[in-house]
Image: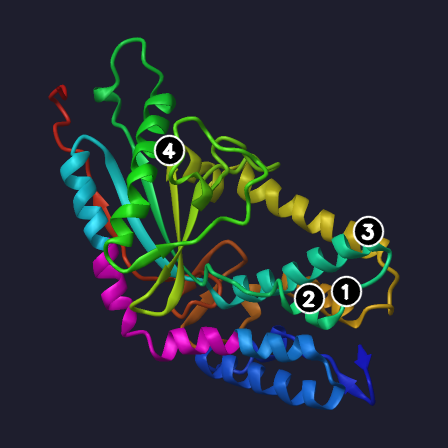
Amino acid sequence: MLWGAGFNMISLNDYLFSGNTVLKILHQYSNDLRNGAKETRNTIDLAHSNFLMQIIELLEHNDFLTSQSLRIKEFYKHMTREYPFLAFTFKGRIKSLIRAEEKFNGYILEYIYNHYQKNGKFPSGAELKSVLNFRDLIAYRIVISMPVCHIKKGEDRSEVERKYLYEIANTLPEFLEERGFTPEISKHQDGGHSDLLADSVRPYYHDSVATPRNSGYQSLHITFYDNLARCYTELQLRTKDMDDFAEIGEANHFGYEKTQEARRSKHDQIPSGECVYFDEAYERLIKLQELELAKIDVNMFKAINNQLINDGCGLFRGRQILPFEHLSRFQNDLID
């Protein structure tokens, strides 16, 4: 596809077959987007380049993650003391390159479509750039489970787990604020919140537990600004059943299928060739969707197919930061 005076649109796919490292791919892709943007005056490609530079910064200068993860680990220790009967995991990750690229272009598609449907015209570059800020490049997930031996007769396990999930969510903001994190007001307030979520913390949470997404996905999401590391960090809280549904259940498979179908539908409703930002974002997403991972040649990455993947570089799966596991104590004793 050509834009402007003979300029070929570039995509991430163009850099995945040369055996380079993810870091080199990021530098090449970012530089080429920036140089192309100068020629075509494409302000969104410039924003795209800057977005990739944020990921480069995370990968090249990640000493702050040690400090950040140690402070978040304090909450893990707090949970082991307060909830020794629960089983839970703490995991952190830096968003994978492919997922970050998909999300950036997905935001462009969504915003332009909604703006066009509402106003009958396309947004300006400045309006579009205003929504292209991402606060989940670094994210941590807390997953809890109540062993069946601690469920009393007549109790519903999922309801017991949900009660503890919200109890943990109510204490998290203040705990981390005392350690240099500032909770951010959530942009998602339309869906409502559970009565189990304290009034004082409700503005901070996107509560997809009380109001599941169309795919059935459930989780509590909260974003913090880390004043010491000077970056945003997202925390997700969910039960093991919610996590299973998100990772290996219908929310993963059918949610992905519905997303692709919705994108195709939106593309059909936007006049082709009218908005370069929409057309480029859509084409980049389609290329990622059609990617055969087994054919990729990236250092420290290997795939047999799109399911059997050994990713040692953070290309397809996020780089882990903080894997901690707490197995429930008192497996044979009742808790007072």
Binning the other alpha carbons within 10 Å of mark 2 as few (below 14), some (14 to 19) or many (20 upward) gives some
Which residue is disc 4 drawn over?
Answer: 198
Can residue 166 be seen here?
yes
Which residue is disc 3 drawn over?
Answer: 117
Query: CA separation, marks 4 and 2?
Result: 34 Å
Query: CA separation, marks 4 and 1?
Result: 38 Å
State the residue lying farthest toward the front: 200
Looking at the figure, which quarter contains the N terminus?
Answer: bottom right
Badges 1 and 2: C-beta atoms under 8 Å apart?
A: yes
Q: Nearer the viewer, mark 4 or mark 2?
A: 4
- Choose between 251 and 15: the one closer to the eye: 251
Which residue is disc 1 drawn over?
Answer: 123
Q: Residue at x 24, y 36 (%)?
A: 87
Can residue 290 be seen here?
no
How many numbered discs?
Answer: 4
Q: Amino acid at mark 2?
A: Leu
Please identify the dominant SS of the magenta region: helix
Q: Residue at x 37, y 28 (%)?
A: 162
- Choose between 13 and 306: the one closer to the eye: 13
Q: Amino acid at mark 3?
A: Gln
Binning the other alpha carbons within 10 Å of mark 4 as few (below 14), some (14 to 19) or many (20 upward) gives some
Percent of width and height locating residue 185: 47, 50
Q: Which residues are magenta?
A: 52-72
Query: CA separation, marks 4 and 3?
Result: 37 Å
Binning the other alpha carbons within 10 Å of mark 1 as few (below 14), some (14 to 19) or many (20 upward) gives some
Percent of width and height locating residue 277: 75, 70
Percent of width and height locating residue 92: 34, 56
